[in-house]
């Protein structure tokens, strides 16, 4: 069973490289451990995923504003947030083979790889450090942010005042985060550089528990709208030993990967922890003024924190299937990198010209591609493997009737449609299922 599961990951990694989804970073130099580059299809899929999240948050929800804060921030922010003190993992080394482990993941008193003796556990801070300016001393240390959330908290008064928002409202942000993970792995599941899609929802204290429930529901519905198998999604509630230093309660949205149930998003009740700490450390008031009740108070925060790369991996794992004569990526049409591929049945009798005109007319509205080479069956297989939801064939009849064959990836059903209605049809069928 385990071999079949590992096998699936190996096949996926191979497909990703072969078809241009994901490459090892710095490959010609032997690669850089746990860093990856998104190829033409991967970049497109990632963009579609981020767009879906962004629009679900800032366009479809009426109560959320967007933000794009900088990666490098004042170092005091990370003292206030608790990351300098608490964002650590216990690290142990094998004295013999020099392999490194997270102490909480080793269940034996000796090295799990070679049986050698282990060092005592020591605390290892996961934040990457660098220096700002030409002098590399302690006063110049800045951190690469380990979460995007802090950029939102320190901008709370700016966004609230400039957007003239009243509670409850949220601030959403997508951006890179960096963690010097001790044990990265499982392809792009755990890496040292990754992207987060985070939303912080500011509420009146006392209303936090209700909003927590609302956001749990909204987020689970969103994951289902990605086309993920509902039987492979669940909530996992953090026990007291698991809670992050800032959280009053926390639920992970988990997916069943070939390597087990794993977190893909966290929904956290962070109380007023962050705003209170930033008030203390900056000396600036971060309170909200309720002008109806004439009250000043620090809002509570419900956070939804999703990993973009990790969810992208989930889409690939969830979509990958080996069927009788084909390998298919069952990606939801609104996320698929290419929406339709157009094929002239044969390269003569005006069919290639018809197909080219059709592609040119679709291009401004949808990401489409033209494929003129090989038997039609092979062209279908090529598109199935990269998850293209629709294939359009121009045949002998097309020139006379102005119709084409539209073939759908999952059911492989075919229908005859008017070429001049195709754009509208494809746009409707690939439109995101906003909630
Ligand atoms: N602001 C809260 C926060 O960052 P987290 O549970 O540490 O919470 C949230 O991270 C999400 O970010 C995770 O559910 C995961 O999807 C993603 N994530 C965290 N560490 C990651 C890593 N090393 N590689 C890829 N994704 C990661």
Image (cartoon, rainbow, N blue to C red):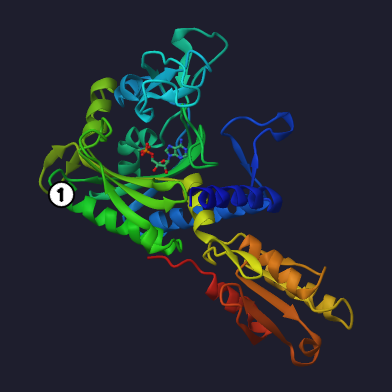
Q: Is residue 270 visible?
A: yes
282 over 296 or under it: above or below: above
138 over 14 or under it: above or below: above
Q: Which residue is mark 1?
A: 207
Image coordinates for residue 148, horizontal then vertical, percent: 41, 36
Q: Is the CB of the residue bearing disc 1 within 8 angstroms of ligand 1?
A: no
Ligand 1, by image quadrant, is top left
For this orientation, the residue located farthest to the right is 348
Residue 218 relative to residue 23: left or right: left
Residue in the picture at 10% in, 47% down: 293
Image coordinates for residue 90, horizontal then vertical, percent: 36, 22
Q: How many marks?
A: 1
Q: Closer to the camera, 85 or 80?
A: 85
- Picture quadrant of residue 414: bottom right
- Picture quadrant of residue 324: bottom right
5 over 346 or under it: above or below: above
User: Tag 1, which secondary structure?
Assistant: loop
Q: Is residue 419 visible?
A: no
Residue 42 relative to residue 68: left or right: right
Residue in the picture at 70% in, 71% down: 380
Image coordinates for residue 32, horizontal then vertical, percent: 63, 30
Residue 276 relative to residue 361: left or right: left
4 over 418 or under it: above or below: above
- Picture quadrant of residue 354: bottom right
């Amino acid at each position: 069973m385990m071999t079949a599961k590992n096998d699936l990951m190996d096949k996926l990694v191979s497909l990703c490289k072969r078809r241009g989804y994901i490459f090892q970073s710095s490959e010609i130099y032997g690669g850089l451990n746990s860093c990856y580059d998104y190829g033409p299809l991967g970049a497109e899929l990632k963009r579609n995923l981020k767009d879906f999240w962004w629009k679900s948050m800032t366009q479809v929800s009426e109560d959320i504003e967007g933000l794009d804060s900088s990666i490098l921030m004042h170092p005091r922010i990370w003292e206030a947030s608790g990351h300098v003190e608490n964002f650590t993992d216990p690290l142990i080394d094998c004295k013999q083979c020099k392999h490194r482990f997270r102490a909480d993941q080793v269940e034996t008193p000796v090295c799990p790889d070679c049986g050698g003796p282990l060092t005592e556990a020591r605390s290892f801070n996961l934040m990457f450090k660098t220096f700002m300016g030409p002098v590399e001393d302690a006063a110049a240390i800045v951190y690469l942010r380990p979460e995007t959330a802090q950029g939102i908290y320190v901008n709370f008064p700016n966004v609230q005042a400039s957007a003239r928002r009243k509670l409850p409202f949220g601030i959403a942000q997508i951006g890179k985060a960096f963690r010097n993970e001790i044990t990265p792995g499982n392809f792009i599941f755990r890496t040292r550089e990754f992207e987060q899609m985070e939303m912080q929802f500011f509420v009146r204290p006392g209303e936090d528990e209700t909003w927590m429930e609302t956001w749990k529901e909204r987020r689970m519905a969103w994951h289902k709208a990605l086309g993920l198998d509902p039987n492979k999604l669940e909530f996992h509630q953090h026990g007291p030993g698991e809670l992050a230093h800032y959280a009053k309660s926390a639920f992970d949205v988990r997916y069943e990967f070939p390597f087990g149930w794993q977190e893909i998003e966290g929904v956290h009740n962070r109380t007023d922890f962050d705003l209170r700490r930033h008030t203390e450390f900056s000396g600036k008031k971060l309170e909200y003024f309720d002008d109806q009740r004439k009250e000043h108070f620090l809002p509570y925060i419900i956070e939804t924190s999703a990993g973009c790369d990790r969810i992208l991996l989930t889409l690939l794992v969830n979509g990958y299937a080996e069927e009788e004569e084909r390998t298919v990526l069952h990606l939801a049409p609104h996320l698929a990198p290419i929406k339709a591929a157009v094929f002239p049945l044969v390269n003569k009798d005006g069919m290639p010209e018809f197909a080219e005109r059709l592609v040119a007319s679709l291009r401004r509205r949808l990401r489409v591609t033209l494929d003129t080479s090989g038997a039609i069956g092979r062209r279908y297989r090529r598109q199935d493997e990269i998850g293209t939801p629709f294939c359009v064939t121009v045949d002998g009849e097309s020139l006379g009737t102005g119709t084409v064959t539209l073939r759908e990836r999952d059911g492989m059903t075919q229908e005859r449609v008017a070429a001049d209605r195709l754009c509208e049809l494809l746009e409707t069928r690939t439109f995101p299922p906003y909630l």
